[in-house]
Amino acid sequence: MEFTFELNGEEHRIGLITRKPRLTLSVDGRVHHVSDVILKNKDQLLLTIDGHRHTVWRARGDDHIHLKIGPGSFTLKYKDPLQVAQQSTDGDDVLKADMPGVVVSVHCEGKTPVVSGDILMVIESMKMQINIVAPRDGIIEAVQVGVDQTFEKGASLISLEVEN
Amino acid sequence: MFDSVLIANRGEIACRIIRTARRLGLRTIAIYHHQDRRAPHVELADEAHIIEADVPTAAYLDIGQIINIAGNASASCVHPGYGFLSENAEFAAAVEATKMTFIGPQPEIIRLMGDKNQSREFAQQTNVPTAPSARQKGDLDALLADATRLGFPLLIKAVAGGGGKGMSIVHNEADLVDCARTASSEAARYFADGRIYAERYIERGRHIEVQILGDGKGDAIHLFERECSVQRRFQKIIEESPATSLDHELRCRICETAVNMAKNANYRNAGTVEFIVAPDGEFYFLETNTRLQVEHPVTELVCGVDLVEAQFRIAATGELPWHQEDIRQSGHAIECRIYCEESDGTFLPAVGTVKVLNIPDVPGIRFDGGIALNQTITAAFDPMAGKLICHGTNRNAAINLCERGLNEIVLLGVNNNIDYLRGILKHEAFKAGRLHTEFIKEHTSTLIPDGPNDSEQTALLIAAALDVDNIRTLIFDTPEPYASIGDWQN
């Protein structure tokens, strides 16, 4: 069985080969032996992989895993097969907020056609203005938020009519 | 000296002020919005009072409520910190209309320096050089015509501006109208004042600023300069003192210019006079910030002073705590601003919850922080999480300490620019001191942080897998014993 993780925009696959007599995992097709897995404290994990000891600082976010190894910090995402299946049904049809913010201006309205790249809305988040751009040609189904309205992360901003 | 202070701020600077105030024996009074109820400044202060507001930032801008709280809590003075009401003349005047003392300049000085047109005029009157500029006298079209005559590139700025808001560089006439409109609308939005002006943009200039202290009666001293050329989105991210580029003569001229301007204005308390220094050594006045700056710690470390203490002493006694000859620069200090933002070069703000926070305790490394474990970083406030400030015997030593500090800080749960900052410090152009305000733009492609090496990447992926409940269960929680695997201990 293999599991998929995303790191720096690239997908990586981890598979369990054996649990005994020792833990053997495949990472992107290469075999690695894990001889020690010790939780030093709730934030630090000690791992010995192929004889090399690593200290990893760890934190679970809402849908990300934050890790620090050596000087660098990295964010990984577990591609849960169930969630991946759900997301694919949403597709390009609903434009959602990547972070909480407020609507500065709206440049489209329902039932009107837009072209890929059109600026549909300007939002402000953490003192920065960000354009919400049409991801494809289509027709606006509805604009869910108005000027000066605030929204949370993940909120639907604009929906496009589903293409047949 | 005062017996108590209300800190009209939050985050890192509120904590910073509280530390000095407590050391001086003042009772510290914090204010907070409900969303900040678990923030460190609330914890640190002797008492904390809630301000009601629907929008969190509005709470810290509510002059009426803040003055009421300060009065009810019998505060003897009010410290505004930086940002929020720190450069609001009405707030300073409202404090002074009570029995309380405002820790900062006179309201009329704040008003004068806050209006960039007026402050530039004041500079010109006192023989401080300014870059050629065009002011908006009538409509926007007239300004644009004047601006075009100045020649490109131009910098468009908000008259009431600051913090990089409403600012843009225009390289040619074709872009001028759009840039000016955007700048004006941003200015109207952030400062409730849509006026803009244009000035000649000094290419490859260095941002050099001078820390000044004035007694409000015509005497002023400087605490030397800071170089803040490493910026993104017109906001500083690495500052240092002394400036590597200045020779003794130019340093003296710039510092004297700043002091003279402060003396001529009868400037009171701490302030910063900002200049842009052109590659040919000519320098031009940018603006005066009538408050403590974010980057004040680098001056504190090289001069061996506490600027917040100096602010309290000036406000309490009306006297400067030092003579000019008492102030010496020793060694080199660098500050790195840690922001919750993406470090892929977009600098988009990041949100999340601080899950792991570990600050190294190393001599020579100071961390001025304003976040706590489990605190949620939201879009409501400025995304600065803290500042790492290092002091070494020379610039290389300070750079090495900063690199060590950035290596050892652990801040997990919300994306941040720690790795990006380290990349700047390690950059050969930074080490060589080849700084200018477009440093980051010029070196964009070589500043993206390195990914993990192969062995680290394998460890990261395995560690991540062990963090997913059902994978961990598959590996460990099965009937078979896992003989050679160490314990999964909690």
Image (spheres, coloured by chain):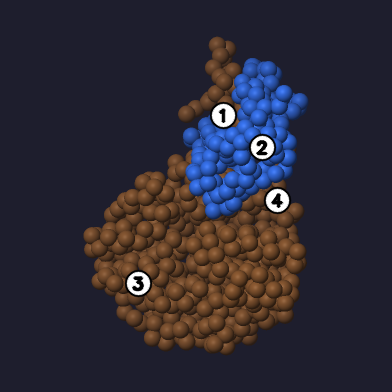
Q: Residue at x 49, y 72 (%)?
A: B114
- Three-letter code for the amino acid on which mark 3 is drawn: Ala
Colour used to depict chain A in the structure image: blue
Q: Position of residue A29 (x, y in %)?
A: 76, 25
Whether label 2 touches label 3, CB < 8 Å: no
Residue B187 appears in the figure: yes
Q: Is residue A47 above or below residue B397?
A: above
Colour used to depict chain B in the structure image: brown
- Three-letter code for the amino acid on which mark 4 is drawn: Ile
Dot 1 and dot 2 within a common chain:
no
Residue that carries the numbered disc 3 in the rendered image: B93
Q: CA distance from mark 4 to mark 2?
A: 40 Å
Q: Residue at x 56, y 32 (%)?
A: A63
Residue B448 circle label: 4
Please state which of the two labelled residues, at mark 4 or mark 3, is closer to the viewer: 3
Mark 4, Cα crowd under 10 Å, few <14 / some 14-19 / many 20+, is some
Residue that carries the numbered disc 2 in the rendered image: A112
Is B84 in front, or is B217?
A: B84
